[in-house]
Structure formats: structure tokens, C-alpha cells
Image (cartoon, rainbow, N blue to C red):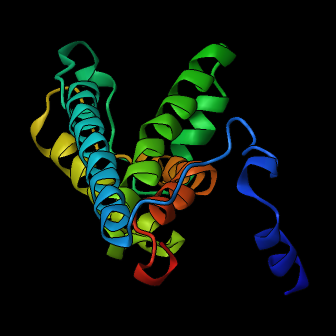
């Protein structure tokens, strides 16, 4: 209190100048809320565009017919069987491509789902939603696409990728975009 009283006694021309780069006056609360809403909408729009782009890539990668490999395709309902077969291949590069590619396909789900669907935030919800979507993709792939088969390991690897995406970035992005009303 004494500091405030002394400060008022010193003429403003003798007070130290405001440091360069110091923030200016805060915008009014109503304007702050509007800016926060616009920022959230922009983030959600970007996430939506990325999710649509990802869906197109996913469809091209998984739902494109492969008639040349029709004789080689077999459905897999036993978790770990395909991964084991990939690892038993003589070329490590092929195993990394198969396993890594399936993990990479799941990462965008873990990053984008918490941004696009605030009620789907949380590790279990993201995993469940990813597993459901990937299960549907695998079923469609196995039932309707020539040279493709259902593989439970793909669902597991895609869900693992979603978990990584969620833990590395999705959780924080979801919280940032959908901040609680009282904390902004």
C-alpha cells in the first residue's frame, strides 16, 4: 500500500517508461472470449481438413484392389500371427514397412479424434473408437476388395498407432482446443 501511495506522489514524467515489448492493455473479457472461440473453431476446421485428407489416404491404401496378391491373401483372426509372419521374412525392410505402416495409419486418429470429438477424449475412448473404425475398414477390405483380407493384427497395430498419437500430441491438442469454460 505504501508503494502505491509513493507512486502516486511521483509525477508521471519522472516514472520509468514502460519496458519495450511489454504487453499492452488486456482486451475486454467479451473480446477475449470471442477470440478464444474463433481460435477453437479454426483449430477444429484444420483438424477436420486433416481428418478428411487422412480418410482419403486410408481408403486408397486399404481399399485398393490387389488382384496379383489374391492367391496369397488369407484372413487372420489370431492376434500376433501376421506380425510373427512379417518378422520371419528374410527382408527386415518388409517387416518394418508392414508393421510400421499399420502403426503410422493409426497415429492421425490419436491426434485428431480428441480435437474433433471432445467427448471422445481419453485414452480408452480414443482406442475404442480407433479399433471400431479400423475393424470396419478391415471387414470392408476382407469382404469387398479383391486381393485383400481381414487381419486382426492390422486393427491392433492401427490402435497402437492411435495410442502413440494420443499420448504424444492428441491429449494436449484436445485439451488446448476444448479448454474448460472456467479456465480461459
**Circle count:** 0
The percent position of residue 128, horizontal first and vertical second, equals: 40, 69
* Residue name at image x 30 percent, y 70 percent: 30
Q: Is residue 88 left or right of residue 72?
A: right
Q: Most extreme residue toward the left, as rendered? A: 144
The percent position of residue 22, horizontal first and vertical second, equals: 68, 44
The percent position of residue 73, horizontal first and vertical second, equals: 31, 31
Q: Is residue 81 above or below residue 99?
A: below
Which image quarter holds the N terminus? Answer: bottom right
* Residue name at image x 16 percent, y 46 percent: 140
Q: Is residue 84 left or right of residue 126?
A: right
* Residue name at image x 42 percent, y 60 percent: 27
Q: Is residue 26 left or right of residue 11?
A: left
Report which quarter residue 113 is drawn in.
bottom left
Report which quarter residue 163 is drawn in.
bottom right
Q: Is residue 50 left or right of residue 21?
A: left
Question: Depth check: 125 or 41 in front?
Answer: 41
Amino acid at each position: 500500500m505504501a508503494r502505491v501511495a509513493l507512486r502516486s506522489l511521483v509525477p508521471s514524467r519522472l516514472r520509468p517508461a514502460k519496458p519495450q515489448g511489454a504487453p499492452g492493455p488486456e482486451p475486454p473479457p467479451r473480446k477475449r472470449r470471442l477470440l478464444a472461440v474463433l481460435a477453437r473453431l479454426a483449430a477444429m476446421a484444420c483438424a477436420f481438413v486433416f481428418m478428411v485428407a487422412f480418410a482419403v489416404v486410408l481408403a486408397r491404401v486399404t481399399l485398393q484392389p490387389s488382384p496379383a496378391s489374391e492367391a496369397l491373401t488369407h484372413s487372420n483372426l489370431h492376434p500376433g500371427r501376421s506380425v510373427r509372419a512379417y518378422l520371419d521374412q528374410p527382408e527386415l525392410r518388409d517387416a518394418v514397412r508392414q508393421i510400421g505402416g499399420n502403426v503410422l495409419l493409426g497415429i492421425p486418429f490419436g491426434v485428431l479424434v480428441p480435437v474433433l470429438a471432445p467427448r471422445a477424449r481419453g485414452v480408452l475412448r480414443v482406442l475404442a473408437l480407433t479399433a471400431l473404425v479400423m475393424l470396419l475398414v478391415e471387414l470392408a477390405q476382407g469382404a469387398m476388395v479383391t486381393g485383400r483380407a481381414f487381419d486382426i493384427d492390422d486393427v491392433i497395430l492401427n490402435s497402437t498407432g492411435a495410442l502413440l498419437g494420443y499420448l504424444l500430441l492428441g491429449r494436449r491438442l484436445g485439451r488446448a482446443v476444448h479448454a474448460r469454460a472456467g479456465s480461459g
